[in-house]
Image (cartoon, rainbow, N blue to C red):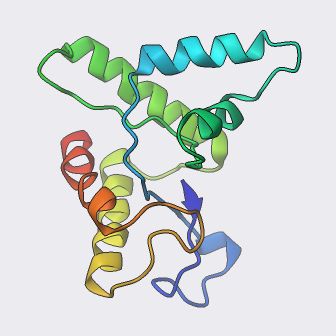
């Protein structure tokens, strides 16, 4: 997530800033990410989790694993992944509103980028129109 200071929110004070999601839509299985992160921490020169993820994912800046609920993912596993996602979001700063409201706001900001033809990558190198459109159903799903 990236603190938003785009033209979608001009003149906001630090107190009023928010996080917004943008993506390259590099889909990585959570278990694969966890195993690779563990292996990189045990290297002679250990790498931080997201530093290693950036190297593994074609220099894509990474800082969150968005949970997907697919045909082979059980309800309990998805719920656990959702909780891990929110714990990660909480660790980056204040997350005080109800989750559904945060997701609705995040979706609104994403859709406004489409509507106003704004960059998805200016602040965070967060992919283009196609990769970000792929995220929309998963934001709705988590809401």
Looking at the picture, how far across and down is residue 20, in whole percent?
47, 61
Front-lying residue, 118 or 56: 56
Residue pictured at 28% horizontal, 21% vertical: 78
Front-lying residue, 29 or 139: 29
Compared across the picture, whether 55 is left or right of 138 comes to right
Compared across the picture, whether 82 is left or right of 141 comes to right
Compared across the picture, whether 129 is left or right of 36 comes to left
Res 29 quadrant in image = top left
Q: How many marks?
A: 0
Residue pictured at 44% horizontal, 61% vertical: 127
Front-lying residue, 68 or 101: 68
Residue pictured at 24% horizontal, 44% vertical: 138
Residue furthest left in the image: 71
Res 143 quadrant in image = top left
Residue furthest front in the image: 58
| Vertical side of 54 occupied by 21: above or below | below
Looking at the picture, how far across and down is residue 21, in whole percent?
44, 57
Residue pictured at 19% horizontal, 42% vertical: 141
Front-lying residue, 21 or 25: 25
Compared across the picture, whether 4 is left or right of 105 comes to right
Looking at the picture, how far across and down is residue 3, in whole percent?
60, 64
Looking at the picture, how far across and down is residue 140, in whole percent?
20, 49
| Vertical side of 54 occupied by 78: above or below | above
Res 40 quadrant in image = top right
Residue furthest right in the image: 44
């Amino acid at each position: 997530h990236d603190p938003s200071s785009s033209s979608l929110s001009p003149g906001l004070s630090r107190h009023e800033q928010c996080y917004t999601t943008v993506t390259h839509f590099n889909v990585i299985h959570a278990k694969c990410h966890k195993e690779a992160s563990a292996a990189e921490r045990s290297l002679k020169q250990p790498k931080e989790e997201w530093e290693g993820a950036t190297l593994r994912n074609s220099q894509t800046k990474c800082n969150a694993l968005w949970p997907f609920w697919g045909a082979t993912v059980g309800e309990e596993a998805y719920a656990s992944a959702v909780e891990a996602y929110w714990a990660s979001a909480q660790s980056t700063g204040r997350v005080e509103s109800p989750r559904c409201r945060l997701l609705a706001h995040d979706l609104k900001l994403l859709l406004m980028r489409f509507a106003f033809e704004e960059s998805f990558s200016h602040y965070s190198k967060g992919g283009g129109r196609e990769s970000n459109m792929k995220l929309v159903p998963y934001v709705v799903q988590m809401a």
